[in-house]
Image (cartoon, rainbow, N blue to C red):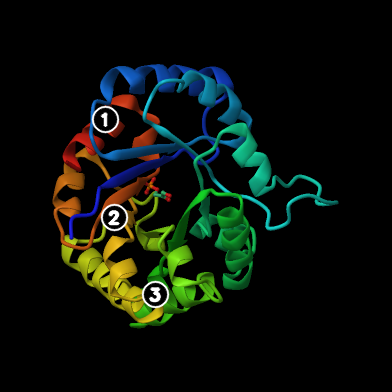
Amino acid sequence: MTRRKFVCGNWKMHKTVAEAVELVRELRQRLNTQIQVGIAPPFTALAPVKAALQGSPIQLFAQNCHHEKQGAFTGEVSAPMLKELGCDGVILGHSERRQLFGETDEGVNKKLKAALEAQLHPIVCVGETLAEREASRTWEVVSRQIRGAFNGLAADAVGRCTIAYEPVWAIGTGKTATTGQAQEVHGQIRGLLREIAGPAVADAVRIQYGGSVKPENAAELLSQPDIDGALVGGASLKADDFARIVAGAK
Ligand code: 13P
């Protein structure tokens, strides 16, 4: 089965509104592609970026959401709020949220259900730390994260998600997983999806790689059979680099 490649830029806590709108202007000039492309600006820039994307196929993603629809949760933003604002999807369970903000598999599961209920396309992030890889615990950790995130979800709901495999040791470090290391885990993830959601869903779900994806390594990584796209951090902040990564994904 041929899955449509999907590349998303995770801007993390970068770009003021003015900078975000300028980057979108540059991206619209440079991106000319049949693959699915998304960008995930910080919350403050979502509405102006949505306006700047009018008429463009580039999709808009948020970087997080709360699992409740509303309530006394100071500083939080809900999935229906993101949907109303025009977001297409939301990144969930990023390792920075797990490591720096205490997110758990159970919390990611609740957010995932909230995102799907709001008709948002979730990108569920998983990945092991360097210590876990060195202790040969990569698959134990990644499989626990995936089972935890998808706990209680029907197969068709799993089919509406994208997974991003992001080894923590490769994020922002310039150390990319080798194509062999990445493909091995992606293949295992595909196998686990087959077990929890059946072969048709497992075949359809896109599994992105993330961690120091650059114009120089994107094409090779994305040529692997189970690598269906990329979740790009640092290199998504420059229009030229991001456009070259997208071009390499074709
Ligand atoms: P870098 O591409 O900066 O390594 O970040 C990857 C990432 O965390 C994307 O979500």
* Mark 3 or mark 1, whichever is nearer to me: 3
Task: Please identify the quarter of the rendering in which residue 245 is found.
Answer: top left
Q: Residues under labels 2 and 3: Cα distance?
A: 32 Å
Label 1 crowd bin: few (<14), some (14–19), many (20+), radius 10 Å:
many
- Neighbor class of circle 2 (other Cα within 10 Å; few <14, some 14-19, many 20+) is few
Q: Residues within 10 Å of mark 3 (few under 14, many from 20)?
A: some
Which element is circle 2 on? loop
Task: Give the amino acid at mark 1.
Answer: Ala
Which label number is shown at residue 163?
none
Q: Looking at the picture, which amino acid does disc 2 mark?
A: Lys
> How many angstroms separate mark 3 from mark 1 (CA)?
34 Å
Q: Which residue is mark 2?
A: 175
Which quadrant: the N terminus? Answer: bottom left
- Residue located beneath label 1 in the image: 243
The residue that label 3 is drawn on is 197
Q: Please identify the quarter of the rendering in which residue 13 is found.
A: top right
Q: Residue at x 42, y 22 (%)?
A: 24
Ranked by sequence position, the earlier of labels 2 and 3 is 2
- Total numbered circles: 3
State which tag comes first along the sequence, 3 or 1.
3
Q: Is mark 2 within 8 Å of ligand 1?
A: no
What's the residue at 46%, 59% (across, down)?
Answer: 124
Mark 2 or mark 1, earlier in chain: 2
